[in-house]
Image (tube, grey):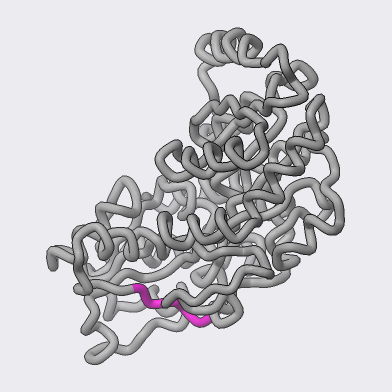
């Protein structure tokens, strides 16, 4: 297992012991959720679900990759009914171990086909697009890069910010290997590394740096820019969406039902609720993510998902298998 998914064995043993105590005596009216989505982003949605259905939820919050490792270690002894992940890679890792139950076709059809597992083991809930964050005046004075490969030019020397250890960046590189091959991806990484890029630990500092005039172009997920503008009542920065390729990748958050769950009917009710107008509107208005439910009428200022040209032929399970190679190439290129 690569270092991205390595879990301290002692801590994990304690984790498994603690999780075994989570299970409720009243399993028919409760759900145990392992959530890779932050509590601040989804707790109100879970509360509303309980208010509407009477089904209680017990939630463990942690990073998606850590929870995926925990579920795999727990195996048939996992107390979890639901795994709700920030990213499709963590979901695919659990799916590849045969630990998810199949989701009904009617539920899968509620979202675009690219936002579900190819074997019907998990389904997307909301989406995050890769984007470039720039000053709002940028397009007036500069040529907009069409793809990631356009960034690998001398004219971008010293102008670009990256978060190379961030999970979304690693997923993007995995996408490049999957679609474009290892050699082309490695050449891109080496080229970018030679352009005196500015390194950041995650997306949000890049957004703040662009707003402050300390950075010209940041490579981020789109919602960080929108959240910054909302929190600061600012319109100084905006997203540019690249025309194609993995730089336009939309990554679904998603959810799957553990095959060992004893409360699958309630788990399906939660999935249906996450696709409801209430929940989809919450993702749009509170986290600035793309709603994925087809029946949701999106009147926001976000571009339409179809206009983003995210690769539509992604098999997320196959893409997830390139993540160890992505981490290796990022390090090998000197990041």
Residue pictured at 22% horizontal, 75% vertical: 135
Name the quadrant of the N terminus: top right
On screen, 332 above or below 36? below
- Magenta span covers which residues? 239-243
Give x and y (percent) for residue 146: 45, 83
Give x and y (percent) for residue 34: 60, 31
Q: Is residue 308 left or right of residue 146?
A: right
Can see residue 149?
Answer: no
Residue 240 located within the stretch drawn in magenta = yes
Give x and y (percent) for residue 221: 42, 61
Q: Quadrant of residue 49?
A: top right
| In-front residue for pair 108/66 | 108
| In-front residue for pair 265/318 | 265
Q: Quadrant of residue 178?
A: bottom right
On screen, 23 above or below 43? above
Q: Is residue 268 left or right of residue 91?
A: right
């Amino acid at each position: 297992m690569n270092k991205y998914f390595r879990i301290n064995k002692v801590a994990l043993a304690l984790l498994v012991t603690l999780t075994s105590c989570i299970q409720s005596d009243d399993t028919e009216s409760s759900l145990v959720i392992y959530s890779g989505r932050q509590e601040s982003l989804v707790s109100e949605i879970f509360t509303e679900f309980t208010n509407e259905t009477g089904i209680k939820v017990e939630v463990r919050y942690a990073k998606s990759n850590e929870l995926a490792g925990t579920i795999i270690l727990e195996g048939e002894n996992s107390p979890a009914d639901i795994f709700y992940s920030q990213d499709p890679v963590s979901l695919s890792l659990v799916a590849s171990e045969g630990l998810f139950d199949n989701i009904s076709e009617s539920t899968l059809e509620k979202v675009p086909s690219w936002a579900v597992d190819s074997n019907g083991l998990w389904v997307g809930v909301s989406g995050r697009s890769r984007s470039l964050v720039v000053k709002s005046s940028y397009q007036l004075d500069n040529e907009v890069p069409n793809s990631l490969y356009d960034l690998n030019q001398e004219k971008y020397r010293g102008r670009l910010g990256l978060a190379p250890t961030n999970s979304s960046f690693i997923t993007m590189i995995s996408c490049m290997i999957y679609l474009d091959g290892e050699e082309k991806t490695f050449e891109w990484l080496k080229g970018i590394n030679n352009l005196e890029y500015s390194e950041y630990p995650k997306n949000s500092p890049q957004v703040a740096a662009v707003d402050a005039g300390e950075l010209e172009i940041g490579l981020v997920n789109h919602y960080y820019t929108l959240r910054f503008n909302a929190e600061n009542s600012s319109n100084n920065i905006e997203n540019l969406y690249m025309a194609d390729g993995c730089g336009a990748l939309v990554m679904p958050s998603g959810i799957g039902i553990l095959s060992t769950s004893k409360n699958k009917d309630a788990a399906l009710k939660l999935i249906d609720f996450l696709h409801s107008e209430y929940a989809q509107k919450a993702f749009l208005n509170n986290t600035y993510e793309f709603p994925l439910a087809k029946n949701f009428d999106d009147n926001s200022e976000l571009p339409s998902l179809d206009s983003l040209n995210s690769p539509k032929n992604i098999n997320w399970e196959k893409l997830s298998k390139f993540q160890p190679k992505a981490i290796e190439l990022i390090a090998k290129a000197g990041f």
